[in-house]
Each structure stands twice: as structure tokens, then as C-alpha cells.
Image (tube, rainbow, N blue to C red):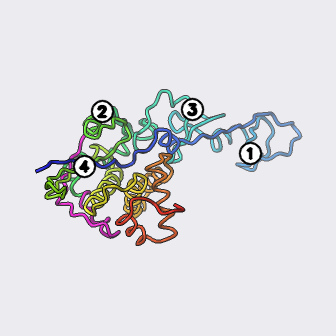
Amino acid sequence: MLSSTYRSRAFLTVSLLFLTAASILFGITCPRSAVAAASSDRKCAYCGEPIRDAYMEQGGKFYHKACWEDHVAIRCSLCGGIIQGAYVKDAWGNRYHTSHRKETAECEYCGRFISEKVTGGGVRYSDGRNVCNICRRTVVEGAGKGRRLLGEAASRLAGLGLRVDPSQVRLQLVDLQRMGELSGDRSRLRMGYTQYEWESTSEGKRRTESVTVYVLIGMPRHETIGTLAHELTHVWLSREGRFETEPALAEGSCNYAAVRVLEEYSDPESRYLIGKMKGSEDPVYGEGLRRVIRFVDRNGAGAWLRLIRSHDGFPAGF
């Protein structure tokens, strides 16, 4: 007997540059202060009363200084101070002074600045990940919850025509260090990894196969479900005998399946995660996903299933 091992690529290997761009937007506010002349007929754009003394101008509108400070000025979500000039904004609408980026940790999964005021605090895992208490509400740390989500992901994939029996898949939740040891990729971006082991005959035909899916412990629910959907799609490809599929088609298809599963939840967290995946600058995971989406938009999901069952790469034009 010959013993062989086949390992898949992981879910959501996206560049750190993209993760930063996805969670932080840059803006600038430039209000101007002045003193109105005694005869001025300007009225405050907020309260409608005449302006007779100090005022602020912003966006072509005039305000009493007090009205502007109390009701119009952009305030930092972290310290509460008024923001004048450049600021950063996360995907949830929170705005921060740029100086806070040097002193405050961002959540690994949602991009918020971790603080009592914004996230109710947070924790730093032993493997170095910073996770806010908003994301901590749904983290997956136990094997029982992990297996329930594995079954949930498998059920939703079956609706797409990707049927994998979850009872035939072992699941292990591991920390970042162990994930790196298993996969050989020690970046902070690897969330999942699938390992196949099989016995084959002297003719090279598989006799038996066992599959283990490794997922990072302590991720929020949606990241875990998305990762499981991605990895189970790899398992489906393996069961279909698709071992030579080009990385962009394989990883793009696995990410597409994960997107389709996440779309069924239709909540802010799933939409945020989908946006990160679709916007990834990674040439395999991000661009591969966008190529699959273009193919499906033009030909339909059924054609995509036929493609990944029978072809190793994209057809011309995709």
C-alpha cells in the first residue's frame, strides 16, 4: 500500500493591505471659524437664529459656535473630542483621530478600535490576535458548536449542489500557531486548512480517504461559517476528483461558495465579510472570486458547477 497526503489551500488568504483598506477609510473635515459683523444677517443652519458673534463655517453653511460644537462637529468615537482635519472611519461608521491608530489595537475581525466606549473592551488571545467584545459575543471555541456550524454550512452548500456529508469530516479548532505548523503558512491571515489522507493501490487508485478540516479557534460565528463553507467546497472538489484545478478557479470557487452561504444570513456582519472577500487584492483568492462571479453572472450557477466538475481552468474571456 502507498500512503499519500493531499492538502488544500486555506480560506480567505487576503493581503494585510486589503484588510486595512477594508476596515479603515480616510476623511477630512475643515471647518473655519470667524466672527460675524454686528450687522450680519447670517442665520445658523442648525437653529435658524441670527448669528451675531463667533460662528463656524462648514460645507458652505454657517453655525453658531456652540451649535456647531454640540450638534454638527464630527467627534471621535474613541475619545469624544472634536475632529478637525484628517480622520479615519471604520466600516461601522465610527470616526477616530488619526493619532489613535498608533496607540489603540484594531479588532482582528471587524476593524473597530478596541476600547470600552466603542466595543466594550476586548481581549488579546495567546496567539496574538486582538478581538473586541462585540465579536467575542459569537466566537466559536467549543467542539460541539463547531460541529453544529459544520453541519449548517454543509446543509447550505447542498442547496447550491455541493453535497458533502459532514459526518465524514473531522473538525479541529486550533490556534494560530498550530495552524501555521499544519499548513506551513504562518501568516495571521490563514483561517482554515483541510488535510486529506488516503491509501492508494499500486495503480495509484484511492482505496480509502479521511478528511480533517482545521479552523481557527475563537473566530466569530460568520467567519467560522464562511471558513467551513470554503473548506467543505475543497472537500467536494476532492471527492469529484478535481486535483489539478488551477488555484484561481479552485480558491475563487471556494470563496464563491462561502459568499453564497453568507448571503443567506443578510446581516451587517455577513455583508462586511462578503465585502472584504469581494474586494480582496489577492490575485488568487480575491481576483479568483471576482472571475467566478463574472462567469456566473454571464452563464448561471449551473454552468459554474459544470465548469468546476470538468475543467481545470477558466474559459477564455474570464
Q: CA distance from mark 3 to mark 1?
A: 21 Å
Q: Does residue 170 appear to the left or right of 127 in the view shown?
A: left
Q: Which span of residues is magenta-colored?
A: 149-174
Camera-near label (4 vs 1) is 4
Q: Residue at x 25, y 61 (%)?
A: 239
- Which mark's residue is nearer the viewer, 1 or 2? 2
Amino acid carrying mark 2 in the image: Asp
Q: Residue at x 47, y 42 (%)?
A: 19
The part of the image, by quadrant, that contains residue 147 is bottom left
Residue 168 visible in rendering = yes
Q: Give how far apart the Cα atoms at labels 2 and 3 are.
A: 27 Å
Give the alpha-carbon distance from disc 2 to disc 4, as whole Å.
Answer: 27 Å
Point out residue 72 in the picture as x, y percentages from the top left corner.
Answer: 65, 44
Q: Secondary structure at mark 4?
A: strand
Rendered image: mark on residue 127: 2
Does residue 161 show up magenta in the picture? yes
Residue hosting label 1: 59
Indicate the secondary structure of the residue bearing disc 1.
loop
Point out the residue furthest to the front here.
203
From the viewer's side, name the closer residue of 3 and 35: 3
Residue 153 in sight in this render: no
The first of marks 1 and 2 along the sequence is 1
* Residue in front for this viewpoint, 204 or 178: 204
Residue located at (67% from left, 39% from top): 29
Question: Between tags 2 and 3, which lies in front?
Answer: 2
**Where is mark 3, residue-wise?**
98
Of callouts 2 and 3, the N-terminal one: 3
